[in-house]
Amino acid sequence: MNEQAEHIKTLIIGSGPAGYTAAIYAARADLKPVVYTGLEPGGQLTTTTEVDNFPGYPEGVDGPTMMVQLQQQAERFGTDVRIGMATAVEFSKEKGGLHRVTIDNQKEVLAETVIISTGATAKYLGLPSEQRLRGGGVSACAVCDGFFYKGQDVAIVGGGDTAAEEATYLANICSKVTMLVRKDHMRASKAMQHRVTSTPNIDLRYNTEIDEVLGEQVVEGLRMVNNQTGEKEEIAITGLFIAIGHKPNTDIFKGQLDMDEAGYLLTEGKSTKTNIPGVFASGDVQDKEYRQAVTAAGTGCMAALDAERYLATIETPV
């Protein structure tokens, strides 16, 4: 099957800001990159209506438009962008070895270098009303979208450090933040809990869950339920932020690449190098701290440079 498998110099798995930035740099370095887009071409940004915090867009840009432009820029330099999903991998542990990747459970490709940019998927509650209003006031990133709700009343769901951090961030720009915690305590660190409880415009509700997100086209309110008493209450809000965690898209790499307990890929120092020679990781798949388009793009650049330097050592061994 080796004879039938396509040989690729640099394979990029994933098509968000990290994947496309890696492709731009790899193509300009003549690494002849091939990008497989995955199930969600363009990544999480395609579900974001407005992007106001990416440098170079003084008037802002909507997420899907930005990702189309990134793709066009990558293709301008010769990137081969393909619709398809990596479904299995067999990485070589030898320096200079070829990495076998299966696409859509049927096609095999052999790659000299692999850049993994599969991202992470935000966890949602799964309520029909929540899913219907994603992009219409329901968001999984307060830092990305909070600005649009300046001076307004919003709500946030979650009890960990991320939820606490995003609640205090929102409190600085919104009139009121209602914070819903499912249990009778927060999982966040004591320091983060103190920040929440000492912020006057955060209304902290324990033992509280969402019963329904209210609104037809955009979020207009929230019906909450106390999971101890069953009592329901409605409040008027314009934005709802879900902060119950992310799941990195790394299942197919388990057993081959080093990960932390949550499944995020581990990279060496400040580089994008994984524990396998010639395999690099960029974007949210290895970053659980920042999760921004601009930081993902930065690590995409780093991964392409790391791949270029790696290939140079293979082609001219020292």
Image (tube, rainbow, N blue to C red):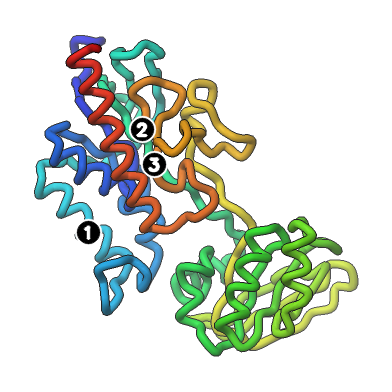
Residue at image position (59%, 35%) is: 260
Q: Count all numbered tags in the image, as a single digit.
A: 3
Q: Position of residue 283 (x, y in %)?
A: 41, 46
Q: Is 272 placed left or right of 214 in the picture?
A: left
Q: Position of residue 217 (x, y in %)?
A: 46, 81
Q: Which mark is residue 68?
A: 1
Q: Are marks 2 and 3 in contact (CB under 8 Å)?
A: no
2 vs 3, front mark: 3
Task: Inspect the image, locate mark 2, and give the three-letter code of the amino acid beneath it.
Answer: Ala
Q: Position of residue 16 (x, y in %)?
A: 33, 51
**As drawn, which residue projects farthest toward the front?**
318
Residue at image position (62%, 79%) is: 171
Residue at image position (9%, 49%) is: 76
Task: Inspect the image, locate mark 3, and give the three-letter code of the amino acid beneath it.
Answer: Ser
Residue of label 2? 86
1 vs 2, front mark: 1
Pick the front one: 134 or 21: 21
Q: Is 27 placed left or right of 89 in the picture?
A: left
Task: Inspect the image, locate mark 1, and give the three-letter code of the amino acid beneath it.
Answer: Val
1 vs 3, front mark: 3
Q: Is 188 placed left or right of 38 in the picture?
A: right
Identify the element where label 2 is drawn: strand
